Image (cartoon, rainbow, N blue to C red):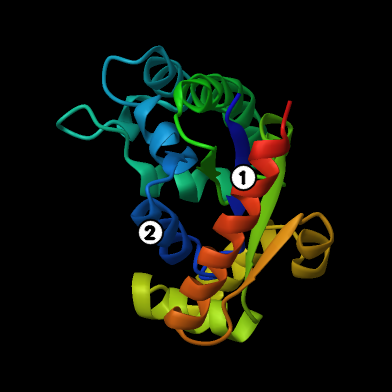
Amino acid sequence: MTLKIGLTGGIGSGKTVATRFFANIGIDIVDADQIARDVVHPGQPALSAIADYFGAQLLQVDGQLDRNQLRQIIFADPEAKLWLEQLLHPLIDQHIEVKLTCANGSYALMVSPLLLETNQQQLVDRVIVVDALPAQQLTRTRQRDHDSVQQIEAIMATQMDRHQRLQLADHILCNQHSQQHLMNQVYQLHTTLCQIASQKP
């Protein structure tokens, strides 16, 4: 049976870069964010439920969900956020489980920014945390998304505290230096995970 590994980290920590290194090795990647987008595609029951609850103005001309508008609503309305999570999280977890089960290789990697916040760690055998300093997270996210400091700090505030996240990690990838440094750690961890997988009953 394929070992199931979860990878997470705060916004701007370097999850995407680390994931790319694992993919380059040939590891099957299950992207929770992509699955979250898939379950609200036009024609999916979840999108119809969202439109019924929040109103058809959340649908764009092409039928796609207006994610920015929805994000603004749920940031301002905890009750709406809870309703949305209760709708989407079980669907997302179901799709993740199917993809992890179908994965090949010694281990598969499930990447999720909210792995620990949403208890998705129950879907995996081990947890990797990509770690960076908060100031680095802020700088990288600003460069990538061009959001304001206030917007990024608001997102960081909704995520698990860095020290708590590190305490829940089975493995830590330190991304406080160069990408080469991160890549070397990924290769070392790959060897470790293959060894662990070989011992899995």
Label count reads: 2
Which residue position is annotated with label 1? 6
Q: What amino acid is found at the position of numbered circle 2 in the picture?
A: Arg
Residue 87 drawn above or below residue 148: above
Q: Left or right of 169: which side holds 45? A: left
Residue 76 can be seen in this image = no
Q: Residue at x 16, y 32 (%)?
A: 61
x then y, percent, for residue 7: 59, 51
Q: Residue at x 59, y 28 (%)?
A: 89
Residue 43, horizontal then vertical, whole percent: 27, 14
Q: Look at label 1 and name its amino acid.
A: Gly
Whether residue 135 is visible here, answered yes or no, is: yes
Residue in view at x 56 percent, y 23 percent: 97
In the rendered structure, find residue 88 and report the number of the disc placed on it. none
In the rendered image, residue 36, in percent from the top left (x then y), is placed at 44, 34
Which of the labelled discs sits on residue 20, or is there none?
A: 2
Q: In the rendered structure, which disc, 2 or 1, sits on the residue that comes first in sequence?
A: 1
Disc 2 and disc 1: Cα gap in Å?
Answer: 14 Å
Q: Pick the residue in front: 80 or 159.
A: 159
Q: Secondary structure at mark 2?
A: helix
139 is higher (above) or lower (below) than 197: below
Name the secondary structure under disc 1: strand
> Where's the N terminus, which quadrant?
top right
Tag 1: Cα neighbours inside 10 Å, few (<14), some, or many (≥20)?
many
